[in-house]
């Protein structure tokens, strides 16, 4: 699981060369700052229009995300005892609880005339906010890891730009919900504003001031109504002595050729009272809210017939629907970028990007499914073609030699694979070292010579990722001058749609098939241990004394089940351990024995080898399926024992019933993930919750 954090953003909208050049200039003399398009809500619309063309013309698009954190608690880190389905649940928890605040998008296009790639790096600042008011009921709370915030502050990250100028968004699921709400509201109350709360028709008159105000408004509206009817019947306009204040508040205008009162300067409560007066006292007057082009305006409209009233209602309804479409379109915000990348079906390139893709699906598509099996088609539908450069570097023998078995972190890979670009010389000298030339273009300015950009800034990281991929393709012998699309290149087929569930363990999921496997690579730090893990043999124990060490737990278990009964023991945190027994039946034996001991009298309990382990009466235990259920819970506690206790209180019956069943996903895993033990009559359920 990657541990990338956020760094400072550039303070200006566009960071370009500091000296003046003419349009379409190519920089080749003195080094300049790295050119990148910084996008906020103030320049989003124009930037999106340009990006559409860049993406359509591109050969591939690299992306990178920066988040407010990675893990919500220490025990949600990636462990060697984590199965494929559990790794997904931990990623799901991260994508649901942390925010994305920077999104890097960098289209790359091959320029055959210059024999180089043209990169268009974009750095989007995004921030979730409720643009649709009460019609958007989604919660926008998110977590921040203190280490991430501290790192941001250290590098002068401009929180004000992110929060104030960040581009908001709606997911597709949120958009569907809002459209449904607005449609229902429009059908039932066509005159209600799309930007205001629903109002009750009857407003209680609890104050003398309200009673007097209602009577005054009824008289005022009645005078205007009677005067209007008298004029329409051929009479003359009656002379009234209205105060300037009254005239300002009751302004006579025409709405779609109909005589109308425009209400100005009233409080929201007064407007509700006026609305009530109109609805109760005047059959041919309608209180409505309409948009006058800049804001919603409260009006009272005269309709001279039932047919005219129906027509008025239809006109106002259509106006509201039109305004709703504009408002929804604006609220979709940054998701327009995701829709663009998805609809164009370009090759999406990321670096260790499983968490990135999970964030994209959660933030811009909808809620994440509860299982990896269900998530795979969702991710595949969103982005049909994805390449992870970390997998590419680790899995391909040619690229492994190029990397010299070095770290495949983004910065390290960029320095090794693209030294000419990392040093800022761009296309210079590329002919001599057989490197791919890359030029950077932002708006009408193109550069092939720059200083190093801000690593870990999303836009620059996306650029680095794309450069690594381009250089990797070059080393694999892919001909960029051919008309064949990169997604159809035979040399890339075995890497497309493979993502790391955990790069440290080498666990990979294939988005094309949904199959999972563990990569046999020298880069996997857990490879040796992972091959020994038999999940049906694992029991989880939590809530014991914090003074109890793993060695002491192992000794107490060995006294009961034998010296060779415990194969390994591993701490999740100071409150919980995994114990892997040598035989799967020992899991149920331990759980049964634990229950029996706790139900016996205290004298026998004190003498038992498990007395220290069970001291305090708060020790809980369960099979591996219980661990999976705890990881899948939305509850968020720092210590695992607290998490387990909270989950047990919420859903102990469900946990117990599920723990008895053989997990279908576990059955489909590789040979290292053998089936749950099928011992007759054994109990693999939750104990002491």
Image (tube, rainbow, N blue to C red):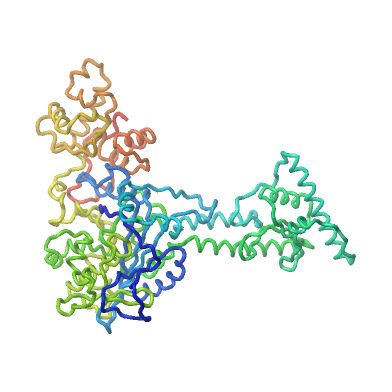
User: Above or below — where is 187 with respect to 115?
Assistant: above
Dividing the picture into quadrants, the one containing residue 413 is bottom left
Dividing the picture into quadrants, the one containing residue 409 is bottom left
Dividing the picture into quadrants, the one containing residue 543 is top left
Q: Identify the residue at the far top of this view.
A: 603
Q: Identify the residue at the far bottom of this view.
A: 113
Q: How many labels were placed on the picture?
A: 0
Q: Using the rendered image of the protein, determine whether residue 365 is visible from the camera's viewpoint.
A: no
**Left or right: where does residue 275 sit relative to residue 492?**
right
User: Above or below — where is 159 with respect to 570?
Assistant: below
Counting from the top left corner in percent of width and height, residue 465 is at 26, 65
Q: Identify the residue at the far front of this view.
A: 19
Write the residue at 17% across / 72% down: 475
Q: Nearer the viewer, residue 554 or 234?
A: 234
Write the residue at 27% across / 42% down: 74
Counting from the top left corner in percent of width and height, residue 202 is at 70, 45
Quadrant in which the C terminus is drawn: top left
Q: Identify the residue at the far left of this view.
A: 563
**Left or right: where does residue 428 sit relative to residue 44?**
left
Q: Nearer the viewer, residue 59 or 454?
A: 454
**Left or right: where does residue 12 sit relative to residue 349?**
right
Counting from the top left corner in percent of width and height, residue 276 is at 73, 49
């Amino acid at each position: 699981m990657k541990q990338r954090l956020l760094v400072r953003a550039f303070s200006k909208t566009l960071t370009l060369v500091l000296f003046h050049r003419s349009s379409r200039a190519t920089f080749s003399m003195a080094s300049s700052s790295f050119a990148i398009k910084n996008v906020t809500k103030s320049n989003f619309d124009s930037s999106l229009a340009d990006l559409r063309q860049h993406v359509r013309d591109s050969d591939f698009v690299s992306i990178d995300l920066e988040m407010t954190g990675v893990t919500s608690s220490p025990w949600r880190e990636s462990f060697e005892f984590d199965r494929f389905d559990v790794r997904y649940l931990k990623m799901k928890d991260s994508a649901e609880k942390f925010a994305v605040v920077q999104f890097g998008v960098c289209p790359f296009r091959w320029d055959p005339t210059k024999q180089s790639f043209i990169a268009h790096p974009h750095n989007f600042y995004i921030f979730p906010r409720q643009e649709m008011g009460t019609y958007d009921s989604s919660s926008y709370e998110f977590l921040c890891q203190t280490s991430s915030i501290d790192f941001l502050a250290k590098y002068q990250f401009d929180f004000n730009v992110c929060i104030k100028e960040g581009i908001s968004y709606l997911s597709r699921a949120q958009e569907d919900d809002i459209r449904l709400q607005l449609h229902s509201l429009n059908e039932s109350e066509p005159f209600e504003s799309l930007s205001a709360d629903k109002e009750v028709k009857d407003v209680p008159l609890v104050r003398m001031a309200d009673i007097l105000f209602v009577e005054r408004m009824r008289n005022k509206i009645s005078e205007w109504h009677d005067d209007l009817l008298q004029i329409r019947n051929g009479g003359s306009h009656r002379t009234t002595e209205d105060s300037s204040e009254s005239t300002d508040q009751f302004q006579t205008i025409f709405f779609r050729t109909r005589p109308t009162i425009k209400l100005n300067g009233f409080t929201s409560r007064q407007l509700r009272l006026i609305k009530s007066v109109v609805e109760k006292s005047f059959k041919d007057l309608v209180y409505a809210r309409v948009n006058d082009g800049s804001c919603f305006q409260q009006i009272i409209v005269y309709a001279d017939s039932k047919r005219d009233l129906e027509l008025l209602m239809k006109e106002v309804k259509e106006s509201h629907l039109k305004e709703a479409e504009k408002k929804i379109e604006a609220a979709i915000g940054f998701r327009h970028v995701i829709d663009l990348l998805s609809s164009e079906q370009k090759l999406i390139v990321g670096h260790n990007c499983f968490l990135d893709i999970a964030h994209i699906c959660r933030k811009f598509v909808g809620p994440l499914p509860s299982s990896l099996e269900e998530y795979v088609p969702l991710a595949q539908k969103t982005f049909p073609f994805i390449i992870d450069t970390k997998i590419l570097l680790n899995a391909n023998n040619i690229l492994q030699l190029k990397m010299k078995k070095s770290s495949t972190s983004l910065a390290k890979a960029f320095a090794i694979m693209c030294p000419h670009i990392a040093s800022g010389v761009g296309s210079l000298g590329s002919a001599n070292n057989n490197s791919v030339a890359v030029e950077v273009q932002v708006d009408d300015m193109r550069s092939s010579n720059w200083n190093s950009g801000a690593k870990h800034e999303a836009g620059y990281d996306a650029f680095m990722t794309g450069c690594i991929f381009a250089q990797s393709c070059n080393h694999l012998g892919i001909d960029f001058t051919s008309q064949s699309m990169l997604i159809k290149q035979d040399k890339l087929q075995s890497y497309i749609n493979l993502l790391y569930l955990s790069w440290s363990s080498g666990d990979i999921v294939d988005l094309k098939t949904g199959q999972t496997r563990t990569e046999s690579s020298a880069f996997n730090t857990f490879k040796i241990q992972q091959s020994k893990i038999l999940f049906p043999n694992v029991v989880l124990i939590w809530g014991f004394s914090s003074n109890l060490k793993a060695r002491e737990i192992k000794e107490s278990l060995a006294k009961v089940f034998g010296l060779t009964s415990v194969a390994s023991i591993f701490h999740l945190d100071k409150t919980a351990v995994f114990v892997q027994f040598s035989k799967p039946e020992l899991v149920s034996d331990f759980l049964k024995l634990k229950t029996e001991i706790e139900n016996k009298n205290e004298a026998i309990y004190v003498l038992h080898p498990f007395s220290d382990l069970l001291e305090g009466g708060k020790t809980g235990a369960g099979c591996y399926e219980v661990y999976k259920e705890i990881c899948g819970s939305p509850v968020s506690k720092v210590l695992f024992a607290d998490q387990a206790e909270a989950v047990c209180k919420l859903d102990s019956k469900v946990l117990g019933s599920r723990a008895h069943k053989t997990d279908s996903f576990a059955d489909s895993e590789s040979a290292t993930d053998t089936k749950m033990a099928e011992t007759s009559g054994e109990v693999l359920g939750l104990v002491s919750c």
